[in-house]
Image: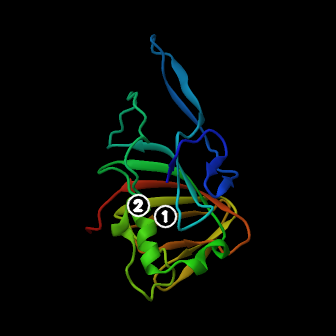
Amino acid sequence: MLLQCGGSLKTGGGTIMGTTVRRVVTGWDANGKSIITSDGPTPVVHTNSMRPGFSSSEVWVTDGVPAKTRETHEPTDRPRSIEPPTGGTVCRIAELPPDTTWLGKIDRVKAVAAYAEFGSSHAVDGNENAPHPFMHKTETVDYGIVLSGEIWMVMDDTETLLRAGDVAVQRGTNHAWSNRSNEVCRMAFILIDGTWKA
């Protein structure tokens, strides 16, 4: 589901609180002086029907390197996808609700449907015996920064707990995020297009 954000999110299931992310974007005036070109909530916020309470605020997207610093279009206005554009990056803030609110209601079929909503059904792990239903991998390098709360990073045969201030460098591996606490975990994600080739 795509929502234009102007505060708390209003959805058919009620209001999701705490999802507003303020985005401040810089640019230039007619004389080449630095200015703030926009200051407000991220214009694109995604939710997922399979994971109530989840939100992903799209902060910025680049189409390649070197990034074009003087583009004037809204870079987050694009088809929904977990991955960045080829050769590009994506920055988002995600809120991950406690697993207890949704985990018992999802199976592999619903997980595939959830990733289809994300625009990335190809990313989901089809293994029925996976340690978490949302196991997935993308051909990216991801920096996952825990801003508040805590989250378990689940791998194929191990897992570790991350707390506020911790950073995960996820290099195209199969993984999932599992919130086993009673509080929402807020994370910043920066995804960089990559390759699995050595």
Above or below residue 110? Residue 63 is above
Label of residue 169 in the image: 1
Q: Secondary structure at mark 2?
A: strand
In depth, the one of 45 and 82 nearer the eye is 45
Q: x, y (%) of residue 176?
A: 50, 73
Q: Quadrant of residue 108?
A: bottom left
- Secondary structure at badge 1 equals strand
Q: Which quadrant of the rendered structure holds the C terminus?
A: bottom left
Q: How many marks?
A: 2
Q: Amino acid at mark 1?
A: Val
- The residue under the point 40% across, 52% down is 80
Residue on which disc 2 sits: 141
> Does 31 sit above or below residue 187?
above
Alpha-carbon distance for marks 2 and 1?
7 Å
In the image: residue 95, left or right of residue 189 = right
Q: Residue 50 location in percent, x, y? A: 53, 68
Pointers 2 and 1 in contact (C-beta within 8 Å): yes
